[in-house]
Image (cartoon, rainbow, N blue to C red):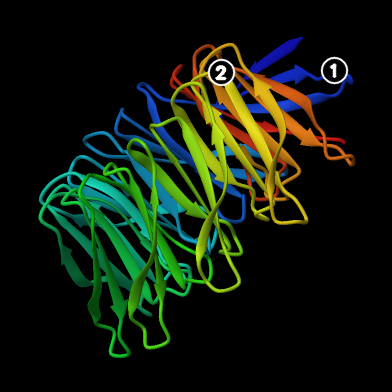
């Protein structure tokens, strides 16, 4: 059922036969140690993988195939990397106390442009939506914002301080706000002023470790998730201030919180084995809409891109799909079964497909039929547990990360 080829272009291809008899190309990216992350660029034309072996590898799509482009080297683990939205830059974050900016030249090749330094591990780095700003976070209790100048250089604009290491940061969609998440149990919001300076606008405290903080797509709300068993929703007022609107409670630590694309629903999940969806009412208040329960720990929960579906992934070996109905309620649509923990589940960009990743060494692709039912379309195999699986922005590729130190990119021809 499989054919494997090898060549001098640093790429191996495996072709697997699908049930209807066609062949699907697979590209395998290997590292010498566990893979920490793998992401597509916004246009789906490039992929970057990062590893505990201190390398990040860039692959580019050429005529439908994935071709090796560059290896970026650090002196320690690279926990994350991010492409700029315009696809012209890439930033890596490393435990060697540096972040590296890699830029694409006019001929399509990539070159190491700049190394940014901290006094301790760099945990995370990401770009603003206009690709003109970059924020890095570090174990040295700081986050740094850099600006891309017209001459091509990157200059530091501000250093944000916390009382403990800074785990992550994110820009609002319009780039006016930056939000930092610290191990001091605080979220800080800074706003960019007309003169280019950054001004602290808000500090959100929690009584326990913060796990995430996320802006809504329209930038008018944010939600935090904390080990103090709560998630807090804040709204931006007309005068630019932020005000607490609602506190969501769980019976155990809250692991993550996120908005639907229209900002009308908030999804939280916690170590109480529950996913809760709260919906905003016409008067602006927030009310619990539905609770989705699993038998044991939930590893992930996410909205589809159109906000019409939710999928959960649990260590009980199942992924559960809920759909939003015309009356505003959420109803269960399907349960996907695996032979072991389901580590992640995510939707394709059009929301018509989803992929699960499991410790049973498989990733399953499901598609939604015209009658609303969900049907298995394909299975991807690895030699060890699959930690995560994601679709490219065009929905034509699925990328899986496995504990076998490899990443697979599968080019799919999905049919309903």
Residue 245 quadrant: bottom left
- 388 vs 190, left or right, is right
**Residue 334 visible in the current orientation:** yes
- What residue do we see at 57% from left, 26% from top? 357
For the residue labelled by badge 1, is the local secondary structure a helix, a strand or a loop? loop
- The residue labelled by disc 1 is 19
Nearer to us of marks 1 and 2 is 2
**Residue 40 visible in the current orientation:** no
- What residue do we see at 41% from left, 64% from top? 222
* Marks 1 and 2, how far apart at CA: 25 Å
Residue 213 quadrant: bottom left
- 406 vs 321, left or right, is left
Residue 368, position as x, y percentages in the image: 80, 38
- Vertical relation: 388 (above or below) 217: above
Residue 379, position as x, y percentages in the image: 70, 21
Q: How many marks?
A: 2
- What residue do we see at 24% from left, 82% from top? 197
User: Residue 177 or 88: which is nearer the viewer?
Assistant: 177
User: Residue 92 or 143: which is nearer the viewer?
Assistant: 143
Q: Are marks 1 and 2 in contact (CB under 8 Å)?
A: no
Q: Which mark is residue 375?
A: none
- What residue do we see at 18% from left, 44% from top? 121
Sequence order check: which comes first, mark 1 or mark 2? 1
- The residue labelled by disc 2 is 317
Residue 288, position as x, y percentages in the image: 53, 52
Q: Quadrant of the N terminus?
A: top right
Density class for disc 2 (Cα within 10 Å; few <14, some 14-19, many ≥20) is: many
Q: Quadrant of the C terminus?
A: top right
């Amino acid at each position: 059922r499989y054919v494997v080829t090898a060549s001098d272009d640093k790429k191996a291809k495996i072709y697997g036969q699908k049930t209807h008899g066609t062949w699907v190309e697979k590209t395998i990216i290997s590292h010498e140690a566990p893979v920490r992350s793998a992401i597509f660029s916004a246009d789906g034309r490039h992929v970057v993988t990062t590893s505990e072996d201190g390398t990040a590898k860039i692959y580019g799509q050429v005529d439908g195939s994935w071709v090796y482009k560059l290896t970026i080297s650090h002196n320690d683990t690279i926990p994350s990397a991010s492409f700029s939205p315009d696809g012209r830059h890439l930033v890596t974050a490393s435990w060697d106390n540096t972040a590296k900016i890699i830029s694409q030249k006019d001929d399509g090749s990539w070159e190491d442009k700049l190394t940014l330094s901290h006094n301790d591990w760099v945990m995370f780095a990401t770009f603003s939506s206009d690709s003109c700003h970059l924020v890095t976070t570090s174990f040295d209790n700081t986050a740094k914002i850099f600006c891309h100048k017209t001459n091509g250089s990157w200059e530091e604009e501000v250093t944000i301080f916390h009382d403990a290491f800074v785990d992550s940061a994110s820009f609002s969609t319009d780039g006016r706000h930056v939000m930092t998440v610290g191990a001091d149990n605080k979220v800080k919001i800074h706003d960019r002023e007309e003169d280019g300076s950054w001004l602290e606008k808000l500090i959100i405290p929690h009584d326990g470790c913060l796990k995430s903080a996320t802006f809504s797509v329209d930038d008018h709300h944010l939600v935090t998730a904390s080990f103090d068993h709560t998630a807090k929703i804040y709204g931006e007022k007309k005068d630019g201030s932020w005000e607490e609107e609602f506190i969501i409670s769980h019976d155990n630590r809250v692991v993550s919180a996120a908005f639907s694309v229209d900002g009308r629903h908030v999804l939280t999940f916690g170590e109480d084995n529950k996913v809760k969806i709260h919906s905003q009412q016409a008067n602006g208040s927030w009310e619990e809409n539905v609770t989705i329960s699993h038998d044991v720990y939930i590893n992930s929960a996410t909205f589809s891109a159109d906000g019409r579906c939710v999928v959960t992934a649990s260590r009980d070996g199942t992924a559960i799909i809920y759909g939003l109905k015309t009356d505003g309620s959420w109803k269960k649509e399907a349960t996907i079964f695996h032979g072991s923990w389901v580590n992640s589940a995510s939707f394709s960009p059009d929301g018509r497909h989803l992929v699960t990743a499991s410790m049973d060494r498989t990733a399953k692709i499901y598609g939604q039929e015209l009658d609303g039912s969900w049907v298995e379309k394909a299975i991807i195999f690895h030699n060890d547990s699959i930690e995560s699986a994601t679709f490219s922005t065009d929905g034509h590729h699925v990328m899986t990360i496995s504990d076998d130190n490899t990443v697979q990119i599968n080019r799919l021809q999905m049919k309903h």
